[in-house]
Amino acid sequence: MLLPLGGAGEIGMNFNAYGFGPPDERKWIVVDCGVLFGRETETPGVDIIMPDIRWLAEQREDVLAIVLTHAHEDHIGAVGHLWPELQCPLYATPFTARLIEDKLFEAGITERVRVNIVPLHGHLNLGPFSIDFLSITHSILEPNALAIRTPLGTVVHTGDWKIDPEPLLGEKTEINALRKIGDEGALALVCDSTNALVQGHSGSEADVRTALTDLIGTLKGRVAVTGFASNVARLDTIAKAARTHGREVALVGRSMHRITKAARDTGYIEDFPRLVSEEEAAQLPPDRILYLCTGSQGEPRAALSRIAAGDHPTVSLGPGDSVIFSSRIIPGNEIGIHALHNKLAALGVEVLTVEDHFVHVSGHPARDELAEMYRWVRPQIAVPVHGELRHLAEHARLAKSLQVPQAVVIQNGQMLRLAPGRAEIVDEVPAGRMFLDGRIRVHEGEGFARTRRALGFAGLVAVTLVLDQRGRLAADPAILFEGIPDAVHPPVREAVAETTRRYNPRSGKEQDLAENVRRAARRAAADVWGKKPITRVELART
Ligand SMILES: [Zn+2]
Ligand SMILES: [Zn+2]
């Protein structure tokens, strides 16, 4: 059985459960436990979204383990939040394990759970599941595909991947192992769909190294480069390019320090150039500095946004300086990133992006790479995951065109039986999203996101009507306006006053009064403003 509870319908919050055995004694393993980042426009005030796993949590005695494929947030970000619901062992390769430990620490559960370290190319037996870790290439250290064997056959779960012949750091793709699984006969390929709509090939980190090194050589003044801190090969490229052109490197932003430390602790980047502190960098001539900054997605609290706003304690940029965005725009972040570009431009800083310079390659397989993977593994069944529905559907079409006998588009909560020659959706269990709102976890069905969006769109009017013991109005209505233009206040006051004047406590009901006032206030606002605020009417007693 394959049961995705996250990632089948969105790029983010990946969570796939694999089950084996008859329903009353079925054992489960979970592959990945990630988050999705909230968007201010859709879920105001919510930074972190994760899968609703209550169905699986109800049978947690039968959940044998969570296996993590790699350390991106959309694969490990929810471990600290969701582990308490499953309380099962965790397994990951060394670099991934190191970053998971940070998550457990943040969640305050380090005492209760340890991460079991699986060596690269390692093997794991968990109940009926026999699992091989296969090295693959992606945009982070230690990405793994899993070959999950059961008596019914072998499922290859790719995790996130691309085919990078020169990943620069870490292992290359274990093509022979994948081919061998194909030779033995693979039941299913459960595969990354992120770039199923992209033609061609994603390109190699080695090509970016050449291009970025050349580009940095042409720049005068201070240079800041921003990108994903988790792409250690890219950080290494940038640091070495800086050295090539006589620049010292300073890391700016917490995750830059955190990730490079984890990479060092696990034996990577031993030849990473020596770093200088932000303070030391500030003393150097402009053409001797390169800053590696967090904040490529326009995150307001990250280093680059603070630098652009002029409120970073040690780093400042101005005319003659350059910022390279060595990353793509994650859909949904366009507005924030463009605002950041504008702020930098206002400082006189030149902004260099992937739009006109070769400064980034994707970590996910484009269509030629997907086709290559299908040629290696030759599965009976293709199950696209890690995508929105449009990605999954296109990936399934591509798989069929590559002669895969069956390709199944599956959504979160659907239970797919994988058996030789036939895959079938046999059940549907509760699934959905949980929001981390401040410190509280709430179900998306509680619906507050809608109210917050409405508040953002048209503000709030709160009316308090004070009635005496006989139901007569005891005072003038008190009206509170929040987020509403001044011009709207008088007509709303007038409408409320008019409605209360017409109220006769002997013939009218108090609840009707409240509702009439509410409607009158909204109508009056709409007449002058063209928008209806959220309106609340409260009845109070003397
Ligand atoms: Zn991912
Ligand atoms: Zn990834």
Image (spheres, grey):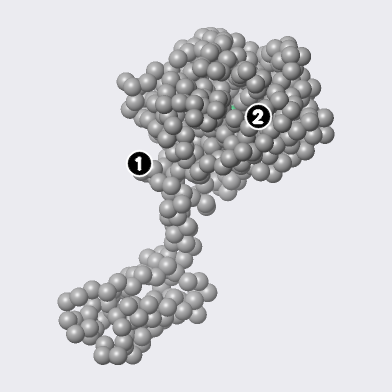
Of residues 418 and 145, the one nearer the viewer is: 418
Badge 1: how crowded within 10 Å, few (<14), some, or many (20+)?
A: few
**Numbered mark located on residue 351 in the image:** none
Numbered-mark total = 2
Q: Residues within 10 Å of mark 2 (few under 14, many from 20)?
A: many
Report whether 66 appears left or right of 492: right
The x, y position of residue 111, in whole percent, is 32, 20
Q: Is residue 27 above or below residue 93?
A: below
Residue 396, by quadrant, is: top right
Task: Give the answer, above or below, for where 482 lies relative to 207.
Answer: below
Query: x%, y% of residue 160?
Result: 63, 27
Q: Confirm if mark 1 falls within 8 A of ligand 1.
A: no
- Indicate the quadrant where residue 136 lies: top right
Q: Which residue type carries mark 2? A: Leu
Q: Position of residue 200 (x, y in %)?
A: 79, 31
Dot 1 or dot 2: first in sequence order is 2
Q: Residue at x 76, y 14 (%)?
A: 183
Can see residue 236? no
How far apart are the two marked residues, 1 and 2, measured between alpha carbons? 39 Å
Percent x, y for residue 230? 54, 25
The residue under the point 56% across, 22% down is: 69
Q: Quadrant of the C terminus?
A: bottom left
Q: Which residue is mark 2?
A: 418
Q: Which amino acid type is shown beneath numbered disc 1? A: Arg
Element at label 1: loop
Whether residue 537 appears in this view of the structure is yes
Q: Which residue position holds label 1?
A: 439
Marks 1,2: beta carbons within 8 A: no
| Helix, strand or loop at mark 2 | strand
Q: Nearer the viewer, mark 1 or mark 2?
A: 2
For image coordinates 71% across by 15% down, the residue present is 181
Please identify the quadrant where the N terminus is shown.
top right
